[in-house]
Image (spheres, rainbow, N blue to C red):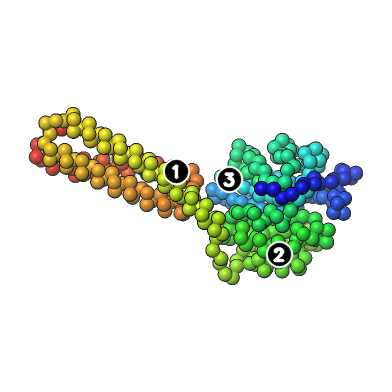
Amino acid sequence: MSWGPLQPARIDFSDPRAPSAPGFGDRYLAPVKALAQAKQVYLTGNGLPGRWAGRQRFVVLETGFGLGHNFLATWAAWQADAQRCDQLWYLALDKHPPRREDLAQAHAHSPLPEQAAALQAAWPPLTPDMHLLRLDSGRVNLLLAWGDIAGVLPEWLAQVDAFCLDGFAPERNPAMWDPWRLRQLPRLAAPGATVATWNAAEPVRQGLRAAGFVLTEAPDASGRHAKTVGHFAPRFASPPPLGRAVAAAVRQAKFLAATMQFNGFGLLCAALLECFIFLLYRKTPLFAKLFWLIWTGGFVFLANVARIYISALLIDRMGMGSSVMIIQFAGLATLYLVLWALWYMLAGWPLRAKKMSF
């Protein structure tokens, strides 16, 4: 996957407090101001950190990664939250990403030095494709796409919980705020998705409304400027993209296939055990052996059918997380213990009544 030649960002550090982008005739925010904006606009506007509390996974998408201040603020908020989600996915794109040395200079006086240093250490090569950075022991996943928004968004497939729309001013970077680009967001939006941006321009708002977002205008911390926040509430719910549905079906099929293999192993062990009983207790009447075989085999078969059905329900409701696997195998062990206890009480009684020795 490639989006053509890549030109790194040209950053002028003549004013170290507020570096500029000569190619756009605009300035980057200083680290302190950028982190304050990230908290006031993007975190608060998307209901974070409250919305990811107790969840297995939360997905954020940012248009215009820039120097990464919004990501660092989100990462720091995630680390500080005791109720944080298990996995944080942060998707971001940028047509002109900074070089590693420029990123280090921009974050030289960052209020978040540990996070900034980790980001610099993992900074990927500037090639026009996607780069996955696994941070914080793999619990924070930063997926960076170096390319133009017009080429990146149509190729992405995700279920985004929070959109952060950032970038230089619309008059200096109109492609980033094109209303037609904003219409790609519903395809990526998860149920209940939210959006937040510092941009309160009416064309941007119209594009978001056309995409199915219900918007509200909220003042920033200073009360002098407006920000745009909203939630995804389309009038007509469209079916998920084919690729997303197929991917979910493939995951379920693989999981159920693994379940069937595990169940097959259990049935094989049960069959071998019964063959061993046949050979060990040769004096036992054939009727008793057949009764044991049919009764035990029936219980094992019903146990596996029930467990496969419960597995499908768990996958449908909870996804493919580790919690499902734990419930699966804990349930398997419990189910087999219960069924063997029932076999002893129900099948063992008529055998003992007939004084059939084992």
Query: Of all residues shown, which one is farthest toward the left?
Result: 354
330 on left or right of 99: left
Mark pair 3, 1: CA separation? 17 Å
Report the residue marked by disc 1: 325
Above or below, 318 against 112 in this view is: below
Q: Which mark is residue 198?
A: none
Q: Reading the chain from its start, which is encountered first: label 3 or label 2?
A: 3
Q: Return the x and y of residue 292 as percentages of the image width and height.
A: 19, 40
Residue 32 visible at all = no
Residue drawn at 63 percent across, 40 percent down: 134
Disc 2 + disc 1, Cβ < 8 Å: no
Q: CA distance from mark 3 to mark 2?
A: 31 Å
**Outermost residue, top direction?**
280
In percent of width and height, residue 67 lies at 77, 46
| Front-lying residue, 261 or 312 | 261
Give the labeled residue for mark 2. Answer: 180
Amino acid tagged 3: Gln
* Image-quadrant location for residue 277: top left
Secondary structure, mark 1, is: helix
Decide which of 46, 127 is in the foreground and name it.
Answer: 127
Q: Dot 3 corresponds to which residue?
A: 87
Cα gap from disc 2 to disc 1, whole angstroms: 42 Å
> Which residue is rendered at x = 58% and y = 60% of the image?
192
Q: Amino acid at mark 2?
A: Trp
Between marks 2 and 1 in the image, the one whose residue lies nearer the viewer:
2
